[in-house]
Amino acid sequence: MQRFFRYMTFVVILLFVSFIGFLKLNPPLTHGSIGTTEDQQTVIVALGNKSLLGNIHITDISINNNQSPTNVKMQVSDSDKGLMITDTYALVEEAYAVQDYDTISLAPNTSPLSSKAMASSVNSAPNTIYGLSITEDSSIDRIKLTYRYFGLIFFTTIQV
């Protein structure tokens, strides 16, 4: 009986370590299209969660050389409406559900789809989409995201 419990403990630990390793090799956060103004001072990035389980919580955002951005919002929209690139959020707050990024959780199975995949999709209902919108006084070259998924911390860098 004692041997059985040792064996089961070993199997559970092995499964847990394998799960963490799988997540680290296949992070759940994905990004799609990137929209920017000509001077790259306003950027919007389509974000999503490719996992089928668990929400993603973005905990920190930095731009360029680890600078803290001054104006960051998250747009929650649907695939029919799309995302809006703007530096004045007051004009689109109601239509696009513009909120602070740390109050939004990216729901499972919301990976941004390419336009070709959307066109061939048989699902006629609009999908929820998320857009990270950043406006700065200088051009934005790189966005570094820190996020939490199943209690694990992940980092990703998006080149603009």
Image (cartoon, rainbow, N blue to C red):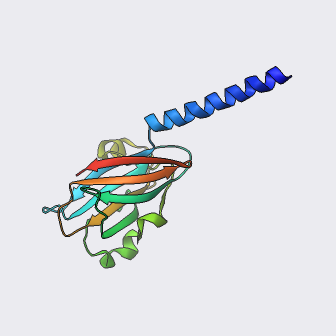
Q: Is residue 11 above or below residue 95?
A: above
Residue 57 visible within the image: yes
Most foreground residue, 8 or 113: 8
Q: Is residue 159 above or below residue 103?
A: above
In what quadrant of the picture does the N terminus appear? Answer: top right
Query: Which residue lies at the image location 29% right of the left edge and 49% below the top edge?
Result: 158
Q: Residue farthest to the bottom?
A: 90
- Residue 98: x and y in percent read 39, 70
Query: Which residue lies at the image location 19% right of the left edge and 65% below the top edge?
Result: 41
Q: How many marks?
A: 0
Residue 102's quadrant in the figure?
bottom left
Query: Which residue lies at the image location 30% right of the left edge and 70% below the top edge?
Result: 70
Most foreground residue, 103 or 146: 146
- Residue 61: x and y in percent read 36, 59
- Residue 92: x and y in percent read 33, 74
Residue 78 visible within the image: no
Q: Is residue 88 above or below residue 145?
A: below
Q: Is 116 positioned to the left or the right of 78 in the image?
A: left
Q: Residue farthest to the left?
A: 38
Query: Which residue lies at the image location 38% right of the left edge and 56% below the top edge?
Result: 79
Q: Is 17 positioned to the left or the right of 145 in the image?
A: right
Q: Is 150 positioned to the left or the right of 35 in the image?
A: right
Most foreground residue, 30 or 158: 158
Most foreground residue, 138 or 2: 2
- Residue 119: x and y in percent read 33, 45
Q: Residue farthest to the right?
A: 1
